[in-house]
Amino acid sequence: MRLERFSVELARPLGTAAGTIESRTGFLVRTDEGTGLGEATPLPGWTESLAECREALEAGNPDGSASSDHVRWPDEQRSSTPAARHGYSLARADAAARESGQRLCDALAADAGRPVPAAESVPVNATVGDGSVAETRDAVRDAVAEGYDCVKLKVGARAPNADETRLRAARDAAGDSVELRADANGAWDQETAERMLDTAAELDYSYVEQPLPAEKASEHAALRGRGVGVALDESLATTTVSAVLDADAADVLVCKPMALGGPDRTLAAVRRARDAGADAVVTTTIDAVVARVGAAHVAAAIPDVPACGLATGSMLSSDLASDPAPVSEGKLRVPEGPGLGTGLESLYRP
């Protein structure tokens, strides 16, 4: 594999309960033959550090394990360097799909035993960062005007009273027909989470994402059944998908290919979630264009996938290439053509 470091800036800092994200730095990964593209863009807190990612990629050990066999490394075990594994496995999957003349999503669906051809587009949610009540209301109205029928609101960085007001303002701005979700990034304690979930249920939110810190699986299980779903995201970076499901801790898994270790690991997680009676959505870690397009192909390979957190390209002020997967009326169109598809040709050349 060949590596090229890059850095892209966000158009506006994204405020979350876990901190503010201002830029993303990672590695463009190319197969030695130059026929496959991947991206390894670590986000500490979800993945390894940038230095650990580079070390794993340069060592040819993207799992960060005693074994370098990225294909047979068990899904039940977590890679210690998931962003590196993502870059490596996406590049290999892209190269294989291009060689066979298939869209990546069709190749992934076939490998996972899913219906082929995969979807041509994927429903996506808009994301509204932490902001004042007025800013929240305006951002939700803008998203609805742009055609989104699902909006996710970042909460947890403010006092509960302030976030309750923001939850209500978002519902008022969205109307009754738009699906709303809230994401606390693990900011609340049990008492606060119970209070906020009750408010979210009253306002007909579909789910609240990561209300408690990542390690509190049993406590998340106790929050279920309050009239609003519980979704887990950061918890998947600290334990296995199987452990979360065995604890009955979630109604929905938020599956980030970059944090789970690649397209194959993500589809395996979705399969296990659905087998256990939960659902799953696919999101990015605000990645550059290669990983975003890869995640879109993953989502397209999932039948009846709910709205996914893939509409993040507009959050960047710069990128590796023009976005070949535009969002229109709340849907992201998956690029046509073999592998990752048309629009990224310039990136295959070193």
Image (cartoon, rainbow, N blue to C red):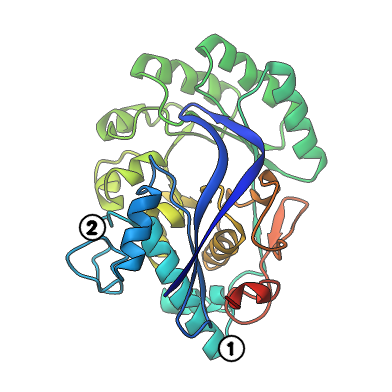
Instruction: State the residue at coordinates (72%, 37%).
Output: 177
Give above or below for 33 relative to 30.
Answer: below
Give above or below for 188 relative to 112.
Answer: above
62 and 310: which is toward the camera: 62
Position of 178 with respect to 117 (left or right) is right
Report x, y in % for residue 103.
59, 79
297 and 285: which is toward the camera: 285
The dot on residue 101 is: 1
Position of 338 with respect to 3 (left or right) is right
Secondary structure of the residue carrying numbered label 2: loop
Position of 240 with respect to 5 (left or right) is left
> Badge 1, how many Cα within 10 Å: few under 14, some, many 20+?
few
| Residue, far bottom | 100
Secondary structure of the residue carrying numbered label 1: loop
Instruction: State the residue at coordinates (58%, 48%).
Output: 309
Q: Quadrant of residue 185?
A: top left
Q: Quadrant of residue 75?
A: bottom left
Between the residue at mark 1 and the residue at mark 2, the CA separation in whole angstroms equals 32 Å
- Residue type at mark 2? Gln
| Residue, far top | 161
- Residue type at mark 1? Gly
Total numbered circles: 2
Residue picked out by circle 2: 77
Instruction: State the residue at coordinates (36%, 18%).
Output: 189
Report x, y in % for residue 333.
70, 64
